[in-house]
Image (cartoon, grey):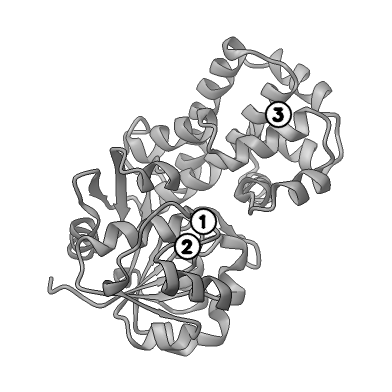
Amino acid sequence: MKKKRIGILGSGSWATALVKILSENTLNLNWFIRNPKTVDQIRSVGRNPRYLSYVDLNLNKLHISLDINKVINDSEILIIAIPSPFIESSLISSKKLISKKILVSASKGIIPESFLTISEHLNREYNIPKKNLAIISGPSHAEEVAQEKLTYLTVGTNNLKLGEHISNLLNTKYIISTVSRDMTGIEISSSLKNIYSIMVGIAHGLGYGDNFISVLISHSSKEMSDFIEAIHKIKRKINHSAYLGDLLVTTYSSFSRNRTFGNMIGKGYSINSAKAEMNMIVEGYYATKNASLISKKLSKKFLIIDVCHKILFENRSANKQIRKLSKELY
């Protein structure tokens, strides 16, 4: 596939990390950034002042714009790196413009307006053919990517030619990417792992140690597999990096915002105060509500998801819920 013009939508940590990666393999990039001050500072010093501010960006390859429609018009492939709760509000006014583009979601989570995965939402609500959709996933904290630490990514898509094209754009000396047809399974997994990360954080905040947390993560892996199978039953290896690997890095890493949020809840913060102090999007919060609704539609009970929902949305005691859960993890 001939190299296509790439546009990045978003200016957070992962968007900035992707700009760094893609700058190594493409002639130029179109980059939509909403904040004028951020644009001015990047143009001035070659660094994003708000996220990964230590990373030098190649300004010779960047065409930065405050106008999302200009970036859409000037690009053939659009990589969405906007937090999932803001994707719909960011794209809705450009619905007609993006209908003939190739869309690659680098975001993880659920669209709150539709309770769909991002690719499902783009397919159903924006009429983007599945052959023009892909996702980028895997255990990939932006902070480590920015430091050029070895990272494994997975491109999920039904279109293998597109997947190989995206994979080639991502591969560098520190990025190894593969292609998978299981776009749906990987997206569900990347949403669920944030729920389990919150739960691990809650347990840690309550004072539980590694012994219990390892059991909690082990059961989370099994529950995640059962949930995915209930929705999209195909042959897959759940221990692949796109599933288990992503779960592990999100539950164990100090970079995990979902674990940090859960830790605050375990230490006694209210839900609202924890969200306010985080000053970042906690994808697992929205994913919990969505997963709970899906489990009810499936008439299935997923124990850990159910407990997380009780703590976050039913005002149940985190201490009592985790203690009760600990007696059922056998």
Using a 10 Å C-alpha cutoff, classify the residue at mark 2 as few (fewer than 14 neighbours), some (14 to 19) or many (20 or more): many
Q: Are marks 1 and 2 in contact (CB under 8 Å)?
A: yes
Q: Which residue is mark 1?
A: 51
Reply above or below: 305 against 94.
Answer: above
State left or right for residue 76 relative to residue 86. left
| Quadrant holding the C terminus | top right
Using a 10 Å C-alpha cutoff, classify the residue at mark 3 as few (fewer than 14 neighbours), some (14 to 19) or many (20 or more): many
* Quarter of the figure with residue 237: top left
Q: Position of residue 197 (x, y in %)?
A: 59, 34
Q: Which residue is mark 3?
A: 202
Determine the CA span between mark 3 and mark 2: 32 Å
Q: Which residue is mark 2?
A: 48
Determine the CA span between mark 1 and mark 2: 6 Å
| Quadrant holding the N terminus | bottom left
From the image, state whether disc 3 or disc 2 is nearer to you.
Answer: 2
State left or right for residue 37 relative to residue 188. right
Q: Position of residue 63 (x, y in %)?
A: 35, 79
Q: Are marks 3 and 2 in contact (CB under 8 Å)?
A: no
Does residue 192 show up? yes
Residue type highlighted by circle 1? Tyr
